[in-house]
Image: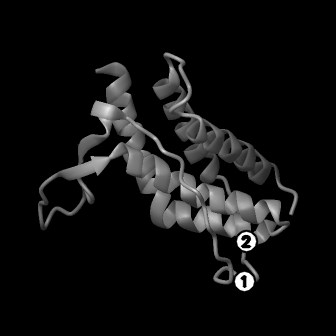
Amino acid sequence: MKNKAVDNFFNSAIYYCNLVENFNSNQENDKLKNLVISLLDLYSKALLLPDVEPKNADSYEFDVFLPQINFEQYDWYWVLFNPYNLNNIEEPVFGSLSDDILDIYKDVKEGILLYDQNEQLEAIWHWKFHFQAHWGRHAVDAIRALHSINFN
């Protein structure tokens, strides 16, 4: 399936995964700023992915190697899971920036593996479904945490 929005997301996904895979070895001063830029790009491009129906969405197993990533003193932050749950005000809990970044990485990388196996419909479905159900929330939390690190 040739689609500009898919091509744009795929390129953003490759860039994000490369950034995460090389994060600890990267000696740049702006690596946290580059990470938030990459996340914003990935998130905005995920919003434009088309709706597709996969042939076999549940038939793929992945063994994705998760890279090591170290945010040192910046790993833990406070988060609310549902800011609109007005009937049951919840206490903030700890979030983990490394968990956010690696959960996003895993979901996006699995789609890249599908795409590379010429399973484009499954890849698109995988990216969009997991964005809506899982990694989109991690991205929002990570973007907020990275903004705080970069500007507070």
Please state if 86 lies on the left or on the right of 143 as rendered: left
User: Can you tell which mark lies on residue 122?
Assistant: 2
Amino acid under label 1? Asn
Image point (12%, 56%), residue name: 91
> What residue did someone put label 1 on?
56
Of mark 1 and mark 2, the one earlier in the sequence is 1
Image point (56%, 26%), residue name: 26
Furthest toward the top, the residue is 29
User: Can you tell which mark lies on residue 2?
Assistant: none
Residue 47 drawn at (x, y percent): 60, 53
Please state if 81 lies on the left or on the right of 110 as rendered: left
Above or below, comparing residue 51 to residue 13 in the picture: below
Residue 140 drawn at (x, y percent): 41, 46
In which quarter of the view is residue 129 placed?
bottom right
Do residues under tags 1 and 2 come within 8 Å of each other at their CB atoms? yes
Label 1, label 2: how many angstroms apart (C-alpha)? 7 Å
Residue 72 drawn at (x, y percent): 33, 33
Image point (38%, 29%), residue name: 147
Rendered-image quadrant of the N terminus: bottom right
User: Crowding at label 2, few (<14), some or many (≥20) Cα neighbours within 10 Å?
Assistant: many
Query: How many labels sit on residues?
Result: 2
Q: Is residue 63 or residue 47 the one in the foreground?
A: 63
Q: Is residue 56 or residue 50 the one in the foreground?
A: 56
Image point (70%, 44%), residue name: 14
Above or below, comparing residue 45 to residue 54 in the picture: above
SS assignment at label 1: loop
Amino acid under label 2? Glu
